[in-house]
Image (cartoon, rainbow, N blue to C red):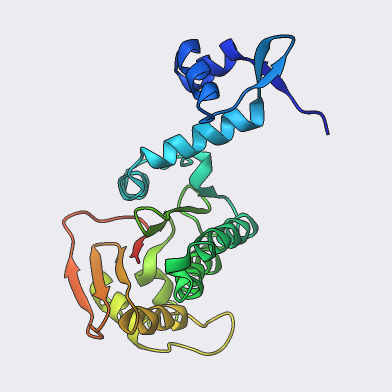
Amino acid sequence: MKIELISIGRAAKILGVSIGTLRRWDDNQKLPAIRKSGKRFYRLSTIKKHLESEFVENSDLVELAWEWVSSEKGKEPFSLFYCSNSAVFKTKLVKMQNKLGSISSLRPIFPLITSIAGEIGNNSFDHNLGKWADIPGIFFGYDEVKKLVVLADRGQGVLETLKRVRKKLSSDEEALEVAFTEIVSGRSPEARGNGLKFVREVVAINKLFLEFQTGKAKLEMKEGKDALNIQSSETSIQGCFTVIKF
């Protein structure tokens, strides 16, 4: 596989810093260069990874996801957080699991964080297959320093999904309570709500905080609080928005 090297000038332009800054980063090993004939070069892949890590570090994932899911007109989110299909999501979920698992303080709980994120993300793909309103796929990002995971989709939302089997449901709030408290159906592919019931159980007995919104209904849960706190939000969204804090 050919490694693409770029000059220090091009690397500086991509990163939006001066050549002098890159020289200092090389000297202090923050971003080491490759020396050839007395000149400094960089792997293009290394520069892209550094750019992505800087973006994550300086971004508010919650704000990015909320702006995307609540906007009137849909567009693909930043590629670093975009899972266009379930295969991409599962690959990124494994990467998150490995990352969180490498942090000693999270070892007792990282499998549960991965499991509930997986349930929520998989729900988005399973329940919106072929029925996405505009942009297929989900927003999925995490920050191990800020200790949070964010997921969002521009799908049909919980109410429209559950009305296929619970036709009398009339509000986002009612649908959200059903999704988190009742096993709607055990017959695949009609097992709607079962995954969110599992999410509720995990959050209630572990040091986790969950925020979940669909339509105008917003739910908050934290450890030791099995009761659901469901309120009406001022802003209605197309699909679902989730924040997990650990």
- For this rendering, which residue is in front, 104 or 152? 104
Q: For residue 60, what is the image quadrant?
A: top left
Residue at screen point 44% across, 68% down: 106
Estimate the x, y position of residue 179 in percent, counting from the top left: 36, 80
149 lies left or right of 237: right
Q: For residue 26, what is the image quadrant?
A: top right
Residue at screen point 23% across, 80% down: 228
- For this rendering, which residue is in front, 36 or 67? 36
84 lies left or right of 148: right
Q: Can you see residue 178?
A: no
Estimate the x, y position of residue 172 in percent, counting from the top left: 27, 70
- For this rendering, which residue is in front, 244 or 173? 244
In the image, residue 140 above or below residue 109? above
Please identify the quadrant where the C terminus is shown: bottom left
- Numbered circles on residues, count: 0
In the image, residue 42 above or below residue 187? above
